[in-house]
Image: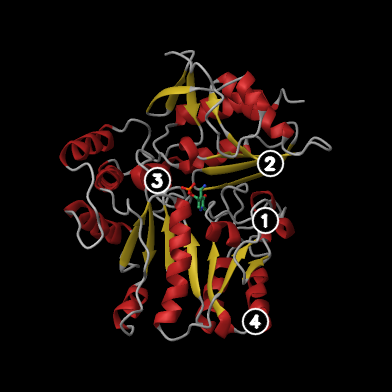
């Protein structure tokens, strides 16, 4: 494989580091659990790309379905018309999500799914004659993509700071994590549930009649695998119900088996009114996102006075090739019993995560489903530098990990076997033993 002749024109997402250009990491092919880089080295995928390849790379059925649909129907509008795969996929998705929802709206990414969900929430209240409900509530440390809606409800300072003013009328719940830091290690999973009551404080402050929706990642992914205290999501659900506020789960990361259940809603047994997803939906092969909504939300638009509709949609909503990829992904989940495999291997994964305890600089370990957050002690005055060093060394050793600040996040394809866990954690142990 040849290297690119120049690396100056591609404006890389989120990347401002000169270091990359001096030391490029170029992936040229992928199969199963491994990438191959430009020098022919195998790199074990410890992150499922960007959390988006549950069934492993180059999955033949999914790749085949994509090839076939491109040949058959390269594009079809879904405005005032449609194509069979869009309708078939919606039905299959209702099955996969256990018929908790009545409808699904297609987008092209997680960011678009989030913005769509927020718009549906606002329009829903208007359709019901409650147009005063315009406030949106997110959470500190929440990541909801990079659209202006998702950025506004998101709670990551550096992502927001260059783009203000963002949406008005947005509040953020405090994140449980900072207060809970060691509650899990202390074995106090119930500690911190009362933080959900911060929502009651916002209701008192603003009045429920002004609040449209709360959006939350059930497990914060991008900010370092932050698991909610037991009962927290349930309490949020109760408060939303009490005040007529819609609850939206952003399951872009937690969807499609990441926690060993179809979605986090199944894991925590709490049902949101809307749910956003993307990533694993097409096994990463083609961009696609989706917003699920409970039946009463769609009904409100059907019953609304003429002129109140959801004026919203994307050129590529329900792209036939994306629908084909998603249908094939669902088939692979079923045929290969991906969730059963994930559940069966999870204890071995969990033990491997805990085996890192006591290694140099490791100050916290978190794991849920097939995800891990490994928090490192920052180098004084250089936040993120130690984890970035770990990322670079890991890549050189042939394992792909992801870092956010000084937290290493792992989220492998769900089809991994014990030998992959051994390889990933064996090499990672070597890396952690050799950091500055
Ligand atoms: N929401 C969550 C919870 C995410 O993790 C992400 C992506 N990491 C997004 C939204 C945005 O998705 P995308 O990058 O596909 O726009």
For the point 45% across and 47% down, which residue is it? 258
Give the image location of residue 286, x and y in percent. Answer: 35, 41
Label drawn at residue 153: none
Residue 218: tell me if it is visible. Answer: no
Give how far apart the Cα atoms at labels 3 and 4 are: 37 Å
Give how far apart the Cα atoms at labels 2 and 3 are: 24 Å
Give the image location of residue 13, x and y in percent. Answer: 55, 38
Marked residue nearer the N-terminal end (4 or 2) = 4
Callout 4 crowding tier (Cα within 10 Å): few <14, some 14–19, many ≥20: few
Give how far apart the Cα atoms at labels 4 and 2 are: 34 Å
Q: Name the front one of labels 1 and 3.
A: 3
Callout 2 crowding tier (Cα within 10 Å): few <14, some 14–19, many ≥20: some
Residue 89 vs residue 149, the one in the foreground: 149
Callout 3 crowding tier (Cα within 10 Å): few <14, some 14–19, many ≥20: many
Give how far apart the Cα atoms at labels 2 and 1 are: 25 Å
Residue 105 lies, with reference to residue 243, above or below; the image says above
For the point 57% across and 42% down, which residue is it? 372
Q: Name the front one of labels 4 and 2.
A: 4
Residue 305 vs residue 24, the one in the foreground: 305
Marked residue nearer the N-terminal end (1 or 3) = 1
Label drawn at residue 187: 1
Residue 300 lies, with reference to residue 56, above or below; the image says below
Task: Quadrant for the N terminus, please.
Answer: top left
- What residue did someone put label 2 on? 405
Marked residue nearer the N-terminal end (3 or 4) = 4
Marked residue nearer the N-terminal end (2 or 1) = 1
For the point 62% across and 29% down, which residue is it? 391
Label drawn at residue 206: 4
- What residue did someone put label 3 on? 280
Q: Is residue 406 left or right of residue 135?
A: right
């Amino acid at each position: 494989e040849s290297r690119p002749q120049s690396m100056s024109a591609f404006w890389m997402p989120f990347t401002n580091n000169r270091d990359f250009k001096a030391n490029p990491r170029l992936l040229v092919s992928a199969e199963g659990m491994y990438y191959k880089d430009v020098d022919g080295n195998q790199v074990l995928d410890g992150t499922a790309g960007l959390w988006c390849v549950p069934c492993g790379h180059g999955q033949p059925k999914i790749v085949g379905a994509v090839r076939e649909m491109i040949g058959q129907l390269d594009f079809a509008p879904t405005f005032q018309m449609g194509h069979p795969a869009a309708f078939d996929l919606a039905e299959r998705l209702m099955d996969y999500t256990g018929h908790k929802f009545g409808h699904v709206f297609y987008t092209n990414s997680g960011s678009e799914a989030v913005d769509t969900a927020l718009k549906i929430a606002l329009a829903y209240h208007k359709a019901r004659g409650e147009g005063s409900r315009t406030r949106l509530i997110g959470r500190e440390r929440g990541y909801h993509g990079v659209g202006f809606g998702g950025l506004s409800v998101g709670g990551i300072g550096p992502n927001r700071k260059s783009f203000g003013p963002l949406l008005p009328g947005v509040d953020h719940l405090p994140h449980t994590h900072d207060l809970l830091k060691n509650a899990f290690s202390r074995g106090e999973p119930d500690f911190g549930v009362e933080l959900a009551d911060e929502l009651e404080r916002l209701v008192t402050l603003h009045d429920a009649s002004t609040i449209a929706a709360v959006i939350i990642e059930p497990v914060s992914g991008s900010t370092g695998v932050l698991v909610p205290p037991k009962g927290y999501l349930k309490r949020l659900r109760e408060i939303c119900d009490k005040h007529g506020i819609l609850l939206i789960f952003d399951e872009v990361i937690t969807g499609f088996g990441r926690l060993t259940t179809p979605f986090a809603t199944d894991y925590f047994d709490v049902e949101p009114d809307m749910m956003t997803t993307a990533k694993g939906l097409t096994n990463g092969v083609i961009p696609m996102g989706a917003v699920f909504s409970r039946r009463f939300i769609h009904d409100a638009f059907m019953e609304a006075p003429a002129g109140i509709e959801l004026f919203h949609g994307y050129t590529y909503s329900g792209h036939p090739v994306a629908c084909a990829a998603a249908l094939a992904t669902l088939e692979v989940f079923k045929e290969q019993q991906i969730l059963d495999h994930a559940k069966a291997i999870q204890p071995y994964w969990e033990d491997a995560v805990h085996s890192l305890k006591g290694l140099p600089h490791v100050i916290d370990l978190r794991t849920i489903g097939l995800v891990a957050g490994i928090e490192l002690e920052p180098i004084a005055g250089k936040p993120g530098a130690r984890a970035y060093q770990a990322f670079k060394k890991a890549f050189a050793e042939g394992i792909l990990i992801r870092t956010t600040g000084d937290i290493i996040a792992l989220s492998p394809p769900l089809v991994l076997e014990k030998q992959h866990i051994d390889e990933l954690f064996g090499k990672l142990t070597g890396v952690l033993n050799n950091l500055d």
